[in-house]
Amino acid sequence: MIKRIWSREILDSRGVPTVECYCQLDDGRFATASVPAGTSTGSHEALELRDKDNPRYHGEGVLKACENINTILGPALVGMDPTKQIEIDQKLISLDGTENKSKYGGNAILAISMVVCKVGAISQNKALYAWINDLAVQKGIAKGIKTPTPLLNMINGGLHGAGNLDFQEFWMIPATNKKFSEGLQMGVEIYHTIGDNLTRRGAIHSVGHEGGYAPNLFTNADAFEVFVESVRQTNYALGRDVFLGLDVAANSFYKDGDYTIRDRSSSLSDDQLLDYYKELISSYKLAILEDPFQEDAWDSWKKVYKELAGTAIIVGDDILVTNPKRLQKAIEEKACNGAVIKPNQIGTISETLDVVKMAKDANWKLVTSHRSGETNDTFIADFSVGIASDYAKFGAPARGERVAKYNRLTAIEIELDYFSGIRK
Ligand code: PGA
Ligand code: ZN
């Protein structure tokens, strides 16, 4: 039984406040959970409540969200059974009563939903990923867990970078037949090789929000050139062991009907940008393309799906925002064939599972994702295993808050190998 729920303000990896929530059961056992936050957020996401009019932390404080937990939402759940996740989430949703969780804050609500999920697992002596899979089954998703293929974010641009590259995330994707730990090791070797090559060119500037290099390069295609050169210097073959991928995050360079990128001297129309993606996909073996167009450009999404979905997975993030209504529209209109899954875009674990179920029923690929503002909470790693996500993107294989999640996945892999007898 839930005895106490309490929260406080902590800092995320960008030095921006976020919500940490603590939940204690009547037998004394407890857990904590903290919520991530995006930098390049979609405008249709659940509302992240910040103390805007309060000058502390430039208005980014979350004292109000914490107070909502401590005085309203937490007390409302005292006495409830923590394994009744769906009931508890429903209660939080109806207490808030708004479409986008703007009354109490998506950050306050998700912090509780996550911590309840953790104590729910603890109360049954289950691994968190196994309990998440039980919840997935309650939502009608097939039983079964697996470790995902990592999308390792090697080079950061857009709103995550240093103001040089336009595209947000340049990924290395290990072939899906590699074990998670093997793919991670390949990624680390390539990451360090990219670092050496950028240093040699005098192009290293810094690292971005997600730990990838944020270099000074002439064009976005140059980032791929360095990438390809680096893969060649390792023992891995591009197109066999390793593929590349891109989160364009096109919202960030879209303005008044055009897209402006440094690869072209004048702004691009949707059709011109699509042609450029075709070039990039064939030159650099891109296997996955995320957010190629801005979040409401449905016609262009339909076009990119029609022309490219056979070659690359077209993944929606800002267009879908882990929202069942937007996902339904995207399925009906054939706008993508992959979904980014970010619990904080919608605000509860149960609703996230609803979206997972819809995407799986449509035979889409799932990309479970961290946010650019992260904490050391590894919940999302267990979540990716519990829903048997195809891919997980937790940033570069560097920086503490990113590797915490990758290290959690290698721990889960060892545990699963042990249970299945592969490891003694
Ligand atoms: P965000 O970026 O966390 O800043 O939104 C991640 C992404 O766009 O996938
Ligand atoms: Zn994205």
Image (spheres, rainbow, N blue to C red):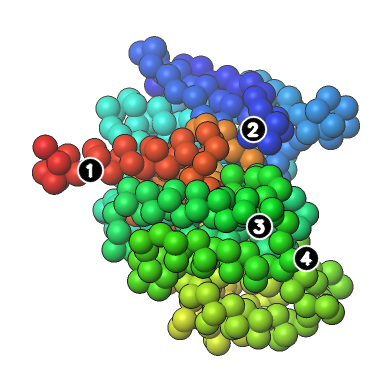
Q: Nearer the viewer, mark 3 or mark 2?
A: 3
Q: Position of residue 51 (x, y in %)?
A: 80, 31
Q: Nearer the viewer, residue 179 or 99?
A: 179
Q: Residue 30 lies in what quarter of the image? A: top left
Q: Quadrant of the N terminus?
A: top left
In the picture, the disc for residue 253 is 4
In the picture, the disc for residue 201 is 3
Q: Position of residue 397 (x, y in %)?
A: 48, 45
Reading the chain from its start, which is encountered first: label 1 or label 3? 3
Which residue is drawn at the image coordinates 33% and 48% (left, top)?
181
Measure how far apart labels 2 and 4 are at the Cα level. 26 Å
Measure how far apart labels 1 and 3 are at the Cα level. 43 Å
Q: Give the residue number, with chain letter if any, for mark 2.
A: 12
Which residue is drawn at the image coordinates 63% and 50% (left, top)?
199
- Residue at disc 2, CB closer than 8 Å to ligand 1: no
Label 2 environment density (alpha carbons within 10 Å; few <14, some 14–19, many ≥20): many
Q: Amino acid at mark 3?
A: Arg
Reading the chain from its start, which is encountered first: label 2 or label 4? 2
Reading the chain from its start, which is encountered first: label 1 or label 4? 4
Q: Give the residue number, with chain letter if any, for mark 1.
A: 416
Q: Quadrant of the C terminus?
A: top left
